[in-house]
Image (cartoon, rainbow, N blue to C red):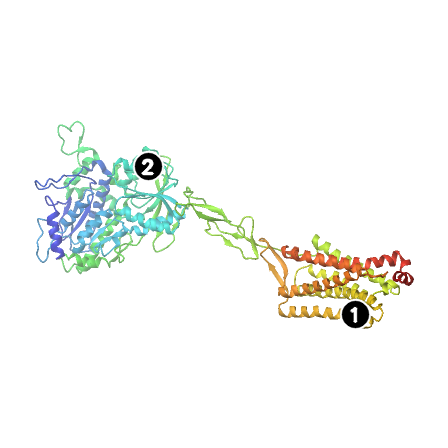
Amino acid sequence: RLKRWLLTLGETNLMGEPEEPQLFKTGDVILGGIFSFQSNWKTVELTYAHRPLPLQCTSFTSNLKSYGVELNYAQAMLFAIEEINNSSDLLPGITLGYMMYDTCGSIARSVRVALALTDVNEETASLSDNPCRGSVPAIIGEASSSPCMAISTVLGPFYIPLVSHFATCACLSNKVRYPSFLRTIPSDYYQSRALAQMVKHFGWTWVGAIRSSDDYGTNGMATFTDTATQLGICLEYSVSFFRTDPSEKIQRIINIIKGSTSRVIVTFLSYTDLEILIDEFAHHNLTGYQWVGTEAWISDSVTATTEGHYILDGSVGLAIPKAEVSGLREFMLDVKPLNSSGEKLFTQFWETAFHCSFKRTKETAGSQKECTGYEDLAGLENSFNDMSLMPIFNNVYKGVYAIAHSLHNILGCGQKCSNTASPDPFTILQNIKNIHFKTKEGEEVYFNENGDPAAKYDIINWQPKKDGSVEFVTIGLYDASDPFIKYVLHMQVPVSICSGTCDSGTRKVLQKGKPVCCYDCIPCAEGEVSNTTDSITCVRCHPEFWSNERRDDCEKKETEFLSFTEIMGSILTLSSLIGACLTATVAFIFFRHRNTPIVKANNSELSFLLLFSLTLCFLCSLTFIGRPSDWSCMLRHTAFGITFVLCISCVLGKTLAVLMAFKATLPGSNLMKWFGPRRQRIVVLAFTFIQIGICIVWLTANPPYPFKNLRHFKDKIILECALGSPIGFWAVLGYIGLLALLCFILAFLARKLPDNFNEAKFITFSMLIFCAVWMTFIPAYVSSPGKFSVVVEIFAILASSFGLLFCIFFPKCYIILLKPEKNTKKNMMDKKS
């Protein structure tokens, strides 16, 4: 049913006379060839009043290059066929013939001649059970992807193999849509990915792109764009062009390029499209750009000699690996086989190449010479004798041999082929997919499951020479089986980036409304670093580390604590030792004068105990200086709490002793009996043991411990003692404050009692100083950061200790040392009376 529909379609759309091949030769098996000898055609308006005329190709004289290249493709096919026919190893006894058609670059004509090769036209079509009888078993061609897609769509239901030598669109690997298509040139899927890797290798992350407005350009650029995006490459612009576009379209492309900031242009252009663009680019002096090309033009010597080719100087791109087919060059330059198989085609080519005419008219007799047919073709400088495209000619050669090897297998050929009947195309298609052979040059030929060969490319660089010509230098190799491109030469390349490299210590921030390749470099915030270039994030340092000035490395934070070596620590240490020495001196003075009345007054035992506790108070401040440790953290607060309670208890005992002494002088009072020296010692010990109990509970439940304070300073670690249990700490301070307040009240009540040695008023002053110091300590301690909180605590300890020492003992030392006449029992009794 599908075949009947195709036959009907063929009868409906094949307008005009049957197509005639440009080159033809009979044989046991006829191979088809589809080439575009002439690249343009005349547009014919359909009037539907009469039978349409055949599509008329324009003269190839306007594009001799295209004609010469396509003619070389046909020559390569002829060479392979002649070589096979003369071979005794391949298809012995079988003669291959050919039918080659010209499509004029028209997709519609490509479909038409493809149908002609299947015998499906108005002259030969029938609705018999074998409609393909007499059709060619396989076809070589076309060179472009779009015609191959159209042809394969038509030939697919007939399973006639179409083996292309230059159609690279990755879409043709789709065996669902194009089941009978094969090729001897790698798919653009590999070329596009290799181009993206090459662009990335050279550091070009900001590029422009120009593509042909056909399947080759569209699909190839799509794959390149996808791969480039994955590699971090951005396209500033991507424009399309076809050789028939108006000049306004070219001008628009030129304006886009001039207004761009990228310096690299990636192309997926056919050489015919490129030549038109280059001519216009040269007219506008559009130089200074790095061109990246595909196999369509990068190794084409004719493109490298066209006017304006200097625009492309320095171009890099992928080319089919160099190849050599022995005898092919000589065969191409010998046009006798061409003349014998297509006289009209030969005549047109010869007259155009040598500017002569075989049949001169009166009008041309004066301007053209007569062709002899013996002109020297090797001396011409045109595309026909240009062998730079030998790798593509080799692809044609391999395609013909692939079909021949398939026929050889199917026909059961050994010394001689047992079957001479032309096999059906489906059998050939299934067999050709599995062939694997070597050419006479040693090159392996095979197809994968998609009908594609192994992908290998040379990386070519256009290097201009002093004489203005271009040398194609191989600078690298690409093999799809190896994920890395191998570069054999290194060269200096231009820079094409949207934004420069972000140094370490910065991070990339995308510019609003622009591609990911356009960004600003923002320094990392404090405490964050980036140690690689082009970092997208900054990493926060470990809490114990801090970023350096360059923000590229985390350095260990400086640890800070109140040490003995720093100025503040030295001053406090000296103050503590001075206080302890002064206290010891007072104790020594009191001991030397222990039998004097002023020392004996108010319980000398408590005085010596008070001096001892004051000494401990001065010395306990030293535990707050130095690197915090487990023992120092526990000792500093507990020692401070216990020694101060002992000190205040002694003062409280002395105050109570003064009050009891004067109350005892009242008639009938026996208070001193109940508050003698023994009871005074008990009171002091009782108050002290309460504080000891509080400290034991604190140390047992949640003791102080060394702590790294990371909060107060971002670039420093403060080593301090954590309180453990804040309740324990404030309970110790609260108990000291309670005793101090009680002592102050009692001393205040006893300050005016008549006694020459009454020290209540001095105790009042000392407790006033003590309470004032510790009341200001609380807000100062809470608000002081880091080691300064330790300084505040030491200052409070020293200030309150000095206050007690000066207020209580210095007046007595003054009398003992400077006023000894007042240190008598008589003076004391006179004061009482």
Seen at 85% across and 56% down, the residue is 814
Residue extending furthest top? 366
Amino acid identity at mark 2? Ile
Q: Quadrant of the N terminus?
A: bottom left
Q: Nearer the viewer, residue 529 or 564?
A: 564
Q: Are marks 2 and 1 in contact (CB under 8 Å)?
A: no
Q: Is residue 534 visible?
A: yes
Q: Residues within 10 Å of mark 1 (few under 14, many from 20)?
A: many
In x, y percent, where is residue 791? 68, 56
How many angstroms separate mark 2 from mark 1 (CA)?
A: 108 Å
Mark 2 vs mark 1: in front? 1
User: Quadrant of the rendered structure where residue 159 is?
Assistant: bottom left
In x, y percent, where is residue 375? 20, 36
Q: Nearer the viewer, residue 715 or 106?
A: 715
Q: Return the mark for residue 254.
A: 2
Disc 2 secondary structure class:
helix
Decide if residue 501 is on the left or right side of residue 22: right
Name the residue that disc number 1 marks. 680
Amino acid identity at mark 1? Gln
In x, y percent, where is residue 278? 31, 37
Q: Is residue 278 visible?
A: no
In x, y percent, where is residue 719? 63, 59
Seen at 89% across and 56% down, the residue is 819
Q: Nearer the viewer, residue 778 or 602?
A: 602
Disc 1 secondary structure class:
helix
Decide if residue 583 is on the left or right side of residue 433: right
Decide if residue 682 is on the left or right side of residue 160: right
